[in-house]
Amino acid sequence: MNDTIIKTLCEQVVTKNGFLYIDTIVRGHKNAVVIEVFIDNPGILTIDDCALVSREIDTLLNETLSAGENFRLDVSSPGIDRPLKYLVQFPKNIGRRFDIVYREEENEIKFTGKLKAVEGSNLIFTNKNNQEKTIPYDSVVSAQMQVSFS
């Protein structure tokens, strides 16, 4: 089972159906391979969306892989523990707190704040002192949502 081929097939199915391809993780061993596919979209991602993509990937993998190659396929949203990958993922997360690492000239800067708005390709955050910070999306190295219980 070639990981590169699996990832390519998964990405093709996800994008063909109009969703954002986030990642594919292939783990396990020959007789117990687990394929996890993470998808998203700018709006709400439903279980029906995941089921649609899962059925298509399952069919394609069964046609492509050698007979006897067994796998378990899981298709889901990336969840709060995975970093955001695309600008279009940010608007639906306005009001949430983030740990952001971004580049400013040659330096990487860490910032924690609440996403206030997305204006064009700029992310506007407020820090704990309610001061605004505008970060161009192109300078973002990583954007991790914080878990909040309030």
Image (spheres, rainbow, N blue to C red):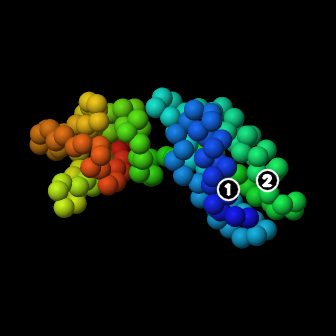
Front residue of 33 and 113: 33
According to the picture, the residue beneath numbered tag 1 turns out to be 6
The single residue placed furthest to the bottom in the displayed view is: 29
Give the percent coordinates (x, y) of residue 25. Answer: 59, 58
Give the secondary structure at mark 1.
helix
Q: Residue flagged by tag 2: what amino acid is it?
A: Thr
According to the picture, the residue beneath numbered tag 2 turns out to be 64
Give the percent coordinates (x, y) of residue 48. Answer: 66, 31
Residue visible at 70% across and 51% down in the picture: 73
Q: In the picture provided, is 90 more to the left or to the right than 24?
A: left
Front residue of 8 and 28: 8
Residue visible at 14% across and 38% down in the picture: 132
Q: Residues within 10 Å of mark 2 (few under 14, many from 20)?
A: few
The single residue placed furthest to the right in the displayed view is: 67
Residue visible at 23% across and 50% down in the picture: 112
Give the secondary structure at mark 2.
helix
Q: Residue flagged by tag 1: what amino acid is it?
A: Ile
